[in-house]
Image (tube, rainbow, N blue to C red):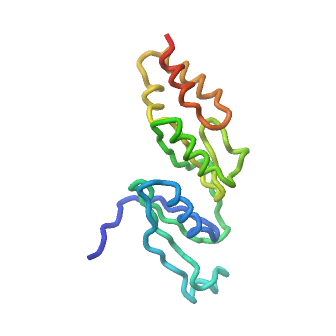
Amino acid sequence: MERKIQKISANLWFDTQAEEAAEFYTTIFNHSKLGRIIRYGKERHIIGGITKGTAMTVEFELEGQTFIALNGGPHFKFNEAISFIVNCDTQEEIDYYWNNLSVGGDEKAQVCGWLKDKYGVSWQIVPSHLNKWLSDPNPNKTERVMKALLQTKKKINMNALIRAYEEE
C-alpha cells in the first residue's frame, strides 16, 4: 500500500550531512523516526562529486512533522531567515532542547531563545504560552513580557517571563 504524501514538507539542503543530521534530530525529539532514504546512483555522483551510495534524500519525522534532508552539495547554506520553533511547556523542556540542539552549534548565534545547531539550522526554543503572553489585552503585561524576553542573553528563562506576565 502506498503511503500518503504530506501536502507540504520542509526540505533542508545539506552539503553532505543529510543522513547524519536526520539521525541527530530523531534522537532528540520524541515521536520521531527516520523514513525512506534515496541514495545517489552512478549518474549523479559523477556530476556533483558525490559518492555513489551516499544518501540523496532522507525523509524523517519529528513530532509528526515530515522533513526531507537533501545532500545537494555546498551551493546553499542555512541562515536565520528560516527557523524552526520548538514550543515547550516547562523550563526543563526548554533546557533539554536547548542543551541538545546547541551541541556543536554556533555560540555567537545564541540569543533570545534562538540557536543555530551544528548543521547551521536555526531553532527557536520558546515557552508554549509566549504568544498568549505577548497578545494579552493588557498592554502592561505584554510590555513586561517583551522587556523580559529582550533581556534574554541566550536560553529563555521561562520563570522570568511568567513573573513578568503575572506581575501586578
Locate residue 45: give its quadrant: bottom right
Question: Could you say where residue 150 lies in the image, as x and y percent from the top left?
Answer: 62, 28
With respect to residue 110, does 166 lie above or below? above
Q: Residue at x 50, y 45 (%)?
A: 85
Question: Could you say where residue 120 lies in the image, as x and y percent from the top left?
Answer: 65, 55
Question: Could you say where residue 71 lies in the image, as x and y percent from the top left?
Answer: 58, 71
Q: Residue at x 46, y 67 (%)?
A: 34
Q: Residue at x 63, y 71 (%)?
A: 16
With respect to residue 69, does 152 lie above or below? above
Lateral position of residue 17 relative to residue 62, left or right: right
- The residue sitting at the top extreme is 168
- The residue sitting at the bottom extreme is 42
- The residue sitting at the left extreme is 1
Camera-nearest residue between 112 and 32: 32
Locate residue 72: give its quadrant: bottom right
Q: How many marks?
A: 0
Lateral position of residue 31 relative to residue 153, left or right: left
Lateral position of residue 78 relative to residue 89, left or right: right
Q: Residue at x 50, y 62 (%)?
A: 11
Question: Could you say where residue 142 lies in the image, as x and y percent from the top left?
Answer: 50, 21
Quadrant placement of the N terminus: bottom left
With respect to residue 93, does 132 lie above or below? above
- The residue sitting at the front extreme is 92
